[in-house]
């Protein structure tokens, strides 16, 4: 066959051959209307190009959409994550197997027949995948779908070469290459969205089918057959019947194709061209690595954004939009080059060669390694995510420019056998695209976060990117299949040591309890325990550290659950309290230490109680976990489908220790040592402090922890806040001063001249890098404190100003840097110091700022209702005579809680203490006695 733009021996005016043989039907000239470059209107050309690009998009979209939902499939069908990775790889390998038949068939039977027959098979193949009940069915039909849809990437390039002229072809190839590369990126994003949505993983197949029908039907109606040998054969057949001259024939009919000829000539042509054409081999290898990198990048993005930065699956996929934008910008760049520099050469009549396509490829070859280098160089969680996200634009632009210009170059060189040339490229690149995910998953899993990000060295053989190591490399690691471990940080060890000292009493000092009272409209309350179980499972999936437990050898260990392990965990961590005589106070008084965080649902009181060891989280984290639980609950309430969670991927969200995140060195500098000793010395301030009057019987055995609560109305809270502001201090400083006043009011008469000592607690989360400064790290211990005293002679206003000065100073750099050394010295002192008599029982203080921005007061549910958090509670277990006052403002109301041990105080006294705190606030700020 001749090139569609070349001059061939002409037919006479009767459209029959008058060249060397009068019975040969050929084109009459370059303007023959049979040539699709002449017969198709510009509108139909570009509509056909867009529809063919859309068909390619749907095929490549389907190749990657399953990669994101694969973990969910594995969970539901009991398959391994590797098998579901194979589902993506088999589809892409189908791209390699299909062109072996598709491309030769398109040069024998025309472009349209094999393209649309395969496309129909691709659409149909989605049905068994969507309805599959075992992994084998999915793997088989995913491969079939890949083979069937391979006609799009394999045939469309030749299709475009048939009906578009060189300048038009450059722009159309940009569209085609863009759809080829955008499809996997969009597919990965949509798959992540499906995994997080109630639709479930099966909609990955249904959506692929919908897209196939939506694009395939209009394409079949609009796009004509364009392959000239087939068109000439059809014309010859028509002329034979019209003229009764049975000798008329096309060139293609001179050599009838048998099965043997098809196998030896057409099926082997792509491989023969790869073996005999050095330019095609080099171009194929280069493009294949860049194409395969797209699928490898999906693994890299999951590793970097989900595992390291602790994004959700959906949010971890959204940075792929930067790659999409880069692909689009790369397309615009090449299109502009084609419509300006390249077309000018064509218009001026100068010699136009295939090599004129290559200058943009040089630019793309430089942009791609630069983008990969920037991706790796900014991949540390200590660096903002935005530079790493934006580097995806360079990656996408580089891959797009290289891919589409290499495709245009191949089309220009091998116009006659373009589909066979492209088939060879598609086969090789699809093999790499299929195998790279299989290699990338274990590579990242084994090399971990110290690995070199070597994608550019794979692609180019000369640029190597370093995957930046960070402190997390010393944290969570895979100890055995499904088991992850890390060491306790020094601050966690310090808090854990204090908690463990209460174990002889079957208690855990300072264990954290958060409560929430809810209201569900229009039902009022939730009675289905399964709803809470699903929400609790979802919370573990999003915050897996709540299920991590300490081991006998002092490690923190997390097990990826199978179905049986998940059931065991639920039995130990999820409880429903149906007894109407047990309220939250009674429940908390009887709580025992648990190796994992627990949640209790009290349906008759519309209340949940979250309980965990203090080394696992703090007050801010506890409220963040409460909010995350209700967010999970809102997605479950009214949902008709059970959640399908990709267990195993949650390990990416395990929270490291404070020391690891801040990279605090094991050995302290002289400055850090001095600072740590200074903070530690404040512990001596408890000596001689004022304390509450308690029973004078040292043999009393500690009982359970209870709480009293008092809420101040929104109107009065607003007045107190305004008055505090007018006095130049915050409301929490005023409450702290009122607590000091209440301590003196209930102290033993002989103690009222002593100083008051309490803790200044500081939230370290704002000082942490992303994502540890966000609720994603709720299950982490990120607070610190020191002791501060005020003299008995201070007034309420003086105390408020003194506390404000400490809080306003905030978290200093020396305070942060000394956290590790401080905890080591404090722990050593606890271990070696002789037993001390209990200190006086002054009221200690803790509060949480900006609770309204931490806990969402009301949110919609999947069932169309509204889930409200009406009231919050927070406190710690105490086995000593020291009570703890916790307070915050939520829904405009100041809420005060006093947590105490029932062996030393009763609820009435605790309530009176809270009332004194309230009265001191009102009197001190508003002047109302």
Image (tube, rainbow, N blue to C red):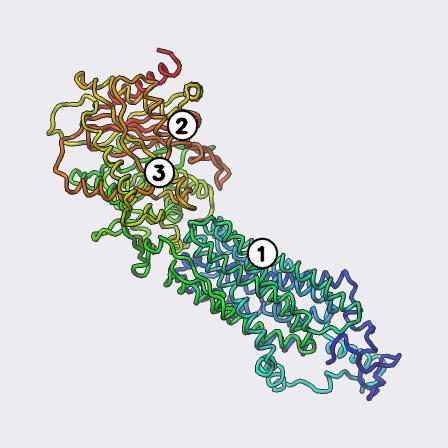
Pointer 1 or 3: first along the chain: 1
Residue that badge 3 annotates: 622
Q: CA distance from mark 1 to mark 3?
A: 38 Å
Relative to residue 168, is residue 878 drawn left or right?
left
- Residue 36 versus residue 751: which sits nearer the camera? 751
Pointer 1 or 2: first along the chain: 1
Residue at screen point 38% across, 44% down = 777
Give the crowd class for mark 2: few <14, some 14-19, many >=20 residues within 10 Å: many
Pointer 2 or 3: first along the chain: 3
Q: CA distance from mark 2 to mark 3?
A: 16 Å
Give the crowd class for mark 3: few <14, some 14-19, many >=20 residues within 10 Å: many
- Residue 550 versus residue 288: which sits nearer the camera? 288
> Based on the displayed image, in which of its 4 quarters is residue 753 positioned?
top left
Residue at screen point 58% across, 72% down = 426
Q: Find residue 292 and report its horizontal and vertical position in percent.
A: 52, 67
**Is residue 431 placed above or below 641 in the rendered structure?**
below
Q: Find residue 756 and report its horizontal and vertical position in percent.
A: 25, 23
Q: CA distance from mark 1 to mark 2?
A: 44 Å
Looking at this rendering, what residue extends furthest in the right direction?
13
The answer to whether mark 1 and mark 3 are in CB contact below 8 A is no
Residue that badge 2 annotates: 889
Is disc 1 placed on a helix, strand or loop?
helix
Is disc 3 placed on a helix, strand or loop?
helix
Is disc 2 placed on a helix, strand or loop?
strand
Residue that badge 1 annotates: 324
**Is residue 922 placed above or below 877 in the rendered structure?**
above
- Residue 697 versus residue 531: which sits nearer the camera? 697
Residue at screen point 85% across, 85% down = 18
């Amino acid at each position: 066959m001749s090139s569609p733009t070349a001059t061939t021996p002409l037919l006479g005016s009767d459209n029959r051959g008058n060249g060397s043989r009068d019975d040969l039907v050929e084109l009459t000239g370059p303007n023959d209307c049979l040539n699709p470059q002449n017969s198709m209107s510009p509108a139909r050309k570009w509509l056909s190009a867009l529809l063919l690009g859309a068909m390619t998009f749907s095929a490549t979209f389907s190749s990657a959409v399953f990669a994101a939902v694969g973990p969910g499939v594995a969970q539901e069908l009991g398959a391994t994550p590797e098998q579901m990775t194979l589902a993506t790889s088999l589809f892409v390998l189908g791209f390699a197997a299909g062109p072996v038949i598709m491309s030769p068939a398109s040069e024998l039977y025309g472009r349209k027949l094999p393209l649309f027959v395969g496309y129909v098979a691709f659409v149909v193949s989605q049905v068994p995948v969507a309805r599959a009940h075992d992994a084998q069915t999915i793997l088989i039909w995913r491969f079939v779908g890949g083979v069937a849809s391979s006609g799009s990437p394999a045939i469309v390039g030749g299709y475009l070469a048939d009906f578009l002229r060189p300048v038009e072809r450059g722009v159309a190839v940009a569209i085609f290459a863009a759809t080829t590369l955008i499809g996997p990126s969009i597919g990965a994003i949509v798959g992540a969205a499906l995994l997080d949505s109630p639709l479930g993983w099966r909609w990955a197949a249904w959506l692929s089918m919908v897209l196939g029908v939506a694009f395939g039907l209009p394409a079949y109606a609009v796009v004509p057959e364009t392959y000239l040998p087939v068109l000439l054969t059809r014309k010859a057949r028509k002329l034979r019947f019209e003229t009764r001259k049975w000798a008329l024939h096309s060139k293609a009919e001179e050599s009838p194709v048998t099965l043997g000829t098809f196998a030896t000539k057409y099926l082997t042509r792509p491989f023969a061209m790869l073996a005999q054409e050095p330019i095609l081999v080099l171009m194929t290898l280069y493009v294949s690595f860049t194409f395969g990198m797209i699928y490898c990048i999906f693994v890299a993005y999951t590793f970097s954004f989900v595992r390291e930065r602790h994004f959700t699956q959906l949010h971890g996929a959204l940075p792929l939009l930067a790659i999409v934008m880069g692909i689009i910008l790369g397309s615009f760049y090449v299109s502009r080059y084609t419509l300006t520099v390249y077309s000018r050469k064509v218009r001026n009549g100068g010699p136009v060669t295939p090599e004129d396509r290559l200058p943009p490829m040089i630019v793309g070859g430089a942009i791609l390694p630069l983008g990969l280098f920037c991706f790796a160089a900014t991949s540390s969680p200590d660096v903002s995510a935005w530079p790493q996200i934006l580097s995806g634009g360079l990656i996408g632009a580089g891959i797009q420019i290289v891919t589409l210009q290499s495709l245009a170059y191949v089309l220009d060189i091998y116009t006659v056998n373009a589909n066979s040339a492209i088939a060879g490229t598609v086969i090789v690149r699809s093999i790499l695209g299929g195998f790279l995910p299989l290699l990338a998953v274990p590579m990242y899993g084994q090399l971990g976060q110290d690995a070199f990000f070597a994608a550019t060295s794979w692609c180019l053989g000369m640029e190597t990117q370093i995957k930046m190591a960070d402190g997390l490399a010393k944290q969570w690691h895979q100890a055995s299949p499904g088991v992850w471990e890390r060491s306790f940080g020094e601050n966690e060890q310090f808090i854990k040591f204090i908690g463990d000292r209460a174990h002889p009493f079957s208690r855990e000092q300072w264990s954290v309890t958060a409560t929430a009272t809810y209201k569900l409209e229009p039902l009022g309350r939730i009675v289905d325990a399964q709803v809470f179980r699903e929400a609790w499972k979802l919370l573990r999936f999003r915050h897996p550290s709540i299920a991590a437990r300490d081991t006998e050898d002092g490690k923190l260990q997390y097990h990826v659950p199978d179905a049986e392990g998940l059931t065991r965990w639920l039995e130990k961590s999820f409880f429903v309290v149906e007894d109407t005589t047990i309220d939250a106070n009674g429940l908390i008084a009887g709580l025992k230490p648990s190796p994992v965080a627990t949640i209790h649902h009290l349906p008759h009181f519309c209340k949940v109680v979250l309980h965990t060891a203090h080394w696992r989280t703090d007050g801010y984290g506890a409220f963040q976990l409460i909010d995350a639980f209700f967010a999970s609950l809102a997605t479950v309430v009214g949902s008709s489908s059970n959640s399908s969670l990709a267990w195993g991927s949650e390990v990416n969200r395990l929270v490291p220790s404070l020391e690891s995140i801040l990279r605090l060195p094991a050995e302290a500098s002289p400055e850090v040592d001095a600072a740590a000793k200074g903070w530690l010395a404040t512990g001596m301030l408890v000596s001689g402090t004022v304390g509450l009057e308690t029973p004078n019987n040292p043999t009393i055995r500690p009982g359970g922890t209870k709480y009293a609560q008092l809420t101040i109305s929104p109107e009065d809270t607003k007045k107190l806040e305004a008055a505090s502001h007018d006095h130049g201090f915050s409301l929490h400083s005023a409450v702290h001063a009122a607590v000091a006043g209440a301590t003196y009011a209930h102290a033993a008469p002989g103690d009222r001249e002593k100083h008051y000592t309490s803790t200044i607690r500081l939230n370290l989360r704002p000082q942490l890098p992303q994502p540890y400064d966000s609720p994603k790290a709720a299950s982490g211990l990120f607070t610190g404190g020191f002791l501060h005293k005020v003299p008995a002679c201070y007034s309420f206003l003086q105390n408020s100003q003194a506390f404000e000065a400490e809080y306003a100073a905030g978290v200093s750099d020396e305070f942060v840097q000394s956290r590790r050394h401080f905890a080591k010295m404090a722990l050593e002192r606890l271990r070696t110091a002789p037993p001390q008599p209990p200190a006086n029982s002054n009221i200690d203080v803790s509060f949480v700022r900006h609770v309204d921005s931490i806990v969402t007061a009301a949110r919609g549910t999947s069932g169309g209702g509204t889930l409200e958090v009406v009231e919050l509670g927070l406190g710690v277990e105490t086995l000593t005579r020291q009570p703890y006052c916790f307070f915050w403002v939520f829904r405009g109301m100041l809420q005060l809680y006093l947590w105490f041990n029932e062996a030393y105080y009763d609820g009435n006294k605790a309530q009176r203490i809270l009332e004194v705190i309230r009265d001191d606030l009102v009197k001190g700020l508003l002047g109302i006695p």
